[in-house]
Structure formats: C-alpha cells, structure tokens
Image (cartoon, rainbow, N blue to C red):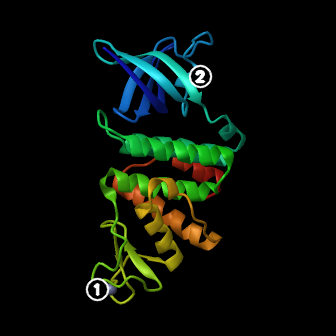
Amino acid sequence: MHIKTDGLVVKEQNVSESDRLITVLTSQYGLIRAFVSGGKTIKNKNLAGTQLLAYSDFVFYRGAEAYNVNTATEKEVFFDLRSDIDNLSIAFYLAELFCELAPEGAECDELLRLLLNSLFLLSKKKKPGALVKSVAELRALAISGYAPNLIACEECGAFESNPMYFDLKNGTLHCRDCAKDGTALSISTVTAMRHIVYSEPKKVFDFSLTDDAQAELSAVTENYALLHTARKYKTLDFLKSLQGI
Ligand SMILES: [Zn+2]
C-alpha cells in the first residue's frame, strides 16, 4: 500500500551503517515513521528530502512491519536557518516538541502549518527567535489538548489586574485579589498569551513585545510546555548552553 503526502521531517535516527529511520509530520496522517534505505549515501536520491527539517512530497510504502520511503522530493529545506545557530537550535527544539505532541494516524494540519510558519519566520528572521519559540510552544500545546483558560480570573471573572497570576499546572489565571500562588505576569504578557491562544492561525505571530515582557513570556510558555509534556528536551538544553543560561 502506498501513501502519498507532503510532510516535514521532525526526527531522524541512524539505525545501521546505511539506513535511517525518520519521523515525518504530515497533515492527514499525523506522525509517520519510515525507514530510508541507503539513507546516508551521497548517491541516495532521497537524501535532501529526508534530512531533518526538510518539507517534502513523500511516497511511502508499507512493508511487513513499517513504512519505507519510496521517494522524497524536497519542497523547502529552510536553508537560511543554517546561518544562525540560535534560530537553528530553536528550530530543532520545536521539531522535537512537535514530535512529542503530534498524534500518529490522525489529522494534524494545524500543527504542521504552525511548525512550517515558525521555521519560515526563523529562517528569514522575520520575527525574533524568542517570540517564535513562545508562540509555537503555547499554540501547539493549546492545539494538542492543553489549552489554558486565559479569558478571565478563574474565581471572580475579573478581566485584568496588574499583575495577574498564572497557574501552570491547571492552566488558569487568577487576579491579584484571588491568587494564592502562581506565576506573576504583567498585563502585556497576559495579552500576548491571549493572542497566541485565541487568534486565528494566520495572525498568531502578529504582535511585538518589550524585552522584559518577552523574557516573562519566554519563561511561562517554556515552563508550560515542559510541565505538560513531562519530559526533557536535549535540543532545549543545547539552546540554553548557547545562550549561557
Ligand atoms: Zn479574581
């Protein structure tokens, strides 16, 4: 059985001297794991289309136990990412995060579009890397069943107070009067989070923040992603080592 689909390579593993196993995020089928034979040889016609972060047209065929890549024709390899190690590291981390969040065998179009847009903005430097990372983290979590409730204070319904408090575990907001604990957030950060969760997909990256508000947003979206996926990311540790954190 053959499957024809476009998809983005979000993970690659070497399984032998010449073979690789790749994980592809597709719009219709979610994650597909497939072997690439002769994956590392220079003559392999599928090499460019099956490398990490390549967005390609794939034809997979189902073998006895797994999928195999029949052909992979690259549409976009985000080549410019290679010129900025920070943005490249963010891209690798987002690939690892989305690989964790995406389902196998289920429609996944919104996650795929979000990741493709993130990679495009990072490669063309159209938005600050920290902003792209925060948007991708929080929006991906929201799409994947971890949407926080950011409309108003969970207790009294107050829309705003300065600061507001965010409960990472329950994904809820509390005003200054009702909060018992939680992460204190300025109104600009709360407004940015509301935009990320509630705006239409095309507009999700359309905002800007001061450095202080971005630092606050970066911390809260990253902690939210780490807490709800309950794992560590090697690519995130690497990004932090680059930033000297
Ligand atoms: Zn309240």
Taking the image as shown, residue 148 lies to the left or right of residue 206, namely: left
Q: Which quarter of the rendered image does ligand 1 occupy?
A: bottom left
**Dot 1: few (<14), some (14–19), or many (≥20) neighbours within 10 Å?**
few
Residue at image position (47%, 12%) is: 37
To which quarter of the image does residue 77 belong? top right
Tell me if residue 43 comes above or below residue 193 in the rendering: above
Residue 115 circle label: none
Residue at image position (42%, 83%) is: 160
Residue at image position (32%, 38%) is: 107
Q: Is residue 186 visible?
A: no
Residue at image position (48%, 15%) is: 71
Residue 109 coordinates in the image, percent (x, y): 39, 41
* Amino acid beneath label 2: Ala
**Image quadrant containing the N terminus:** top left
Residue 156 circle label: 1
**Dot 2: few (<14), some (14–19), or many (≥20) neighbours within 10 Å?**
some
Which of the marked residues, 1 or 2, is nearer the chain's N terminus?
A: 2
Residue 203 coordinates in the image, percent (x, y): 51, 58
Q: Dot 1: what SS?
A: loop
Q: Residue at label 2?
A: 48
Q: Is residue 70 visible?
A: yes
Label 1 beta carbon within 8 A of ligand 1: yes
Tell me if residue 31 comes above or below residue 166 in the rendering: above
